[in-house]
Image (tube, helix red, strand yellow):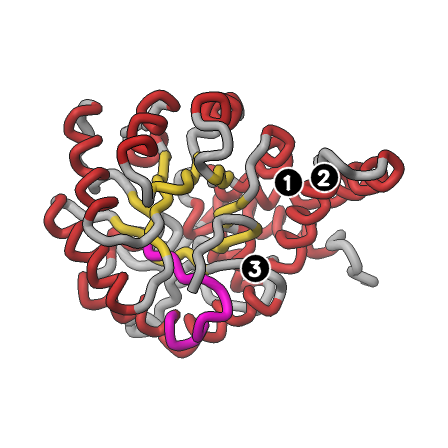
Amino acid sequence: MTMTWTGVMPAITTPFTADGDVDHEFLARHALWMVEAGCTGIVALGSLGEAATLSATEKLDVLRTLAKALRGRVPLVAGIAALSTDEACGLARAAADVGCAGLMVLPPYVYSTDWREMRAHVAAVIEATALPCMLYNNPIAYRTDFRPAQVAELARAHGNLVAIKESSADIRRIAAIRHLLPGRLDILVGVDDLIVEGIAAGATGWVAGLVNAMPVESVRLFELATRANAPDAEPAAQARARAATDELYRWFLPLLTLDTVPRFVQLIKLVQQRVGHGTERVRAPRLVLEGEEREAALALIAEALATRPGNDA
């Protein structure tokens, strides 16, 4: 199917059974639940998907389950990261064979180095298939920072690099990339608590985390923020959209910040559990939250649910 890089695209969590295996039955239902809420694609095997803890076989099985469940309703994007370049290229080709519509290309696990080596790695992955690719820039997590000029160099060299997931948390990056590559790359916000500001700066998509627990609110926030910043919008309608955006964002922001801390996987899965759509199970070395940290998170979640828009309680 045609790959588009707009709208809300969940970085889907990987669910586990009580025995520690991937819960494929729930994974399929979970993806469809978010699509029914208006999500425009599914991004699998990312950081939130705990891809680094999955075997190569498990990764392909996750992609097969999602491809079968989605049946082309929305694009399936495979996160591509590995310890070695050869392994990453092999996963990219396998993802294409499974039926993925696009790839999210990450720097290698563990090893972070200079631009020459990182360029060679991501270039090899981009060239491994003809699939459209989204570069994932997350210097906080991966210690590799793809600067705007470097992103421009890659995009000019590789026609199938068509998007970037920008997770540096530096809002200036969006403007810088747009300046260097006007109209060339779709820019997707990769940190939840920057989505409204990111759309105002020119982003057209959101690879989202809390959407795994709250897809309706996530899609609504994205749509409102987009309308509030539409250049051809009627001023009164734009003002109404901006006011509605601000109101929803004020409620949602405490939850969205959970996506930007070291234990974001545990926290987002805990929110899923509290809304009745998933469990907090994670795969070691991650452990579920406990003690004061867990109690603080539960209190924050409880407050958000008690004041959730449309909640009559």
Secondary-structure class at tag 2? helix
Q: Which residue is drawn at 55% across and 47% down?
A: 297
Query: Which disc, if any, is residue 253?
Result: 1
How far across and down, in percent of the image, does residue 60 sit? 25, 66
Q: Is mark 3 in CB contact (under 8 Å) with mark 1?
A: no
Write the residue at 34% across / 47% down.
Answer: 133
- Measured as percent of width and height from the top left, residue 227 is found at 73, 43
**In the image, 142: left or right of 188?**
left
Q: Mark 3 points at which residue?
A: 39
Q: Nearer the viewer, mark 2 or mark 3?
A: 3
Amino acid type of the residue tagged 1 in the rendering: Leu
Residue 170 within the segment the image draws in magenta: no
Corner quadrant of residue 111: top left
Disc 2 packing (10 Å; few <14; some 14–19; many ≥20): few
- The mark closer to the camera, 3 or 1, is 3
Label 3 sits on a secondary structure element that is loop
> Residue drawn 79% across and 59% down?
310
Q: Which amino acid, mark 2?
A: Arg
Q: Mark 2 points at which residue?
A: 250
Marks 2 and 3, how far apart at CA: 22 Å
Residue segment shown in magenta: 67-78
Give the distance between the C-alpha atoms of the residues marked 2 and 1, in whole angstroms: 6 Å
Residue 73 belongs to magenta span: yes
